[in-house]
Image: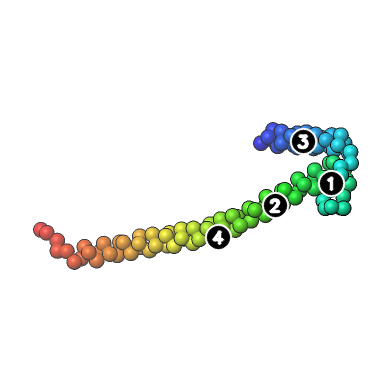
Amino acid sequence: MILMTAIIWILRFVVFAVLILFAIQNTELVHLKLAADYQWEAPLVVVLLIFFAAGTFLGMLALVGKLYRQGREITRLKRELERAEMARVESLLHAPAAAAATDMDTPAHA
């Protein structure tokens, strides 16, 4: 477990170092033409970070509906399971009483 944690931290450090090197290497200004006369100028790494963050946000936003439906289905299934378990317990509790009543009604053969 400790080895796995160490490996994960090493991988995180390597990814962080690669991203820092990428940011240092891509400081050139990029011109984005958004409208007819509106132009935005920013370092390439900033533009990439903004678009990456926007894509991540939109992807998470697309999942919200599905996660909500799954949560409702999980709640419904838990309720259904609880009802089934209660019905099973009740049937087990009433089964011996029903069997005893049936035994009393049938005459014993000698």
Q: CA distance from mark 3 to mark 2?
A: 23 Å
Element under label 3?
helix
Residue depicted at x 67% and y 54%: 61
Which three-letter amino acid code belongs to the residue tagged 4? Arg
Q: Is residue 41 left or right of residue 84?
A: right
Label 4 vs label 1, nearer the camera: 1
User: Looking at the image, is mark 4 or mark 1 earlier in the sequence?
Assistant: 1
In this rendering, the answer to whether 17 lies above or below 57 is: above
Residue that label 2 marks: 58
Label 2 vs label 4, nearer the camera: 2
Residue depicted at x 82% and y 51%: 34
For residue 15, the mark is 3
User: Looking at the image, is mark 3 or mark 1 earlier in the sequence?
Assistant: 3
Residue that label 1 marks: 32
Label 4 neighbourhood size at 10 Å, few (<14), some (14-19), many (20+)? few
Q: CA distance from mark 3 to mark 1?
A: 28 Å
